[in-house]
Amino acid sequence: MIDVHYWTTPNGHKITIFLEEAGLQYKIFPVNIGKGEQFKAEFLTISPNNRIPAIVDHAPPDGGKPISVFESGAILFYLANKTGKFIAKDMRERMQTLEWLFWQMGGLGPMAGQYNHFGNYAQEKLQYAIDRYRNEVNRLYGVMNKRLADRPFLAGEYSIADMACYPWILPERQAQNIADFPHLKRWHETIKARPAVVKAYEWTPKINPGQGGIRTAEERAILFGQTAASVKGAADRAAAR
Ligand SMILES: N[C@@H](CCC(=O)N[C@@H](CS)C(=O)NCC(=O)O)C(=O)O
């Protein structure tokens, strides 16, 4: 059994997609990041960066004690290694999968995240920041579109690289016109129709029926007001218990 510490966000969806695709047994532990549950002491012991997702695998492949993993890319890599699925065995193809996985983790995810912040969430509209991140997301869409022009998936067969990227292609939220990227559009539609992907997204209305972005001042303060003091505060609270 795998415990999934999860919220209904793109990085959370990556993991439920893998688990559904691989048919692994898992249990969802919701971490409501709008309410600050990512600062609970028990969560920080497995996810010291106070971010979802994180997993605990009670039956790791080495037969040892349960293992926890945080960072969605590391989790996908762990699960691919555990199951031997969605990552190529051939060294060259395997490296391509990792290249595109790291590309998502270091590029598409952070840049789209910053666009979401400045374009959708920030109350003060800073045109320079909005343009900067919308353009960068546009460039990254172009990179993916080109890559997908002559292959069905990012690294040969459908893999953890596709699972990492898919939840982050949100053209409307990212002020992008998907029609400008026909190969990306085809790839996105193909993955969206996969039964495991449909199932993975069924968690959203169950866990977070009011899904719809950050609305309250409290949610803003929790998510956008973090400093080192937030992490230290959580550690102090845990020590005082
Ligand atoms: N690089 C991390 C990013 C994780 C991340 O940013 N998670 C967001 C939700 S998508 C989160 O937990 N936010 C809580 C917070 O900002 O305190 C990963 O891929 O796992």
Image: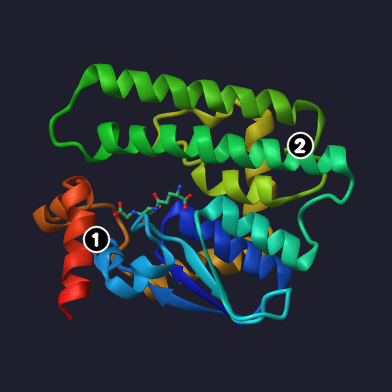
- As shown in the figure, which amino acid type bears the numbered disc 1? Gly
Badge 1: residue crowd in 10 Å (few <14, some 14–19, many ≥20): some
Picture disc at residue 96: 2
Asked if disc 2 is less than 8 Å from ligand 1, the answer is no
Q: In the rendered image of this protein, does residue 116 appear above or below residue 17? A: above
Residue at the outermost front position? 239
In terms of secondary structure, where does tag 1 sit?
loop
Badge 2: residue crowd in 10 Å (few <14, some 14–19, many ≥20): some
Q: Percent from the top left, x then y, of residue 89? A: 87, 51
Q: In the rendered image of this protein, does residue 31 appear above or below residue 115? A: below
Left or right: 148 in relation to 117: right
Q: In front: 146, or 63? A: 63
Residue at the outermost right position? 90
- Circles 2, 1 touching at the beta carbon (< 8 Å): no
Q: In the rendered image of this protein, does residue 132 appear above or below residue 113? A: above
Q: In the rendered image of this protein, does residue 223 appear above or below residue 66? A: above
Q: In front: 16, or 58? A: 58
Name the residue: 72% across, 80% down. Answer: 63
Q: Earlier in the sequence, mark 2 or mark 1?
A: 1
Name the residue: 23% across, 19% down. Answer: 127
Name the residue: 73% across, 74% down. Answer: 62
Residue at the outermost left position? 217
Q: Percent from the top left, x then y, of residue 150? A: 81, 28
Picture disc at residue 34: 1
Left or right: 191 in relation to 222: right
Name the residue: 11% across, 58% down. Answer: 218
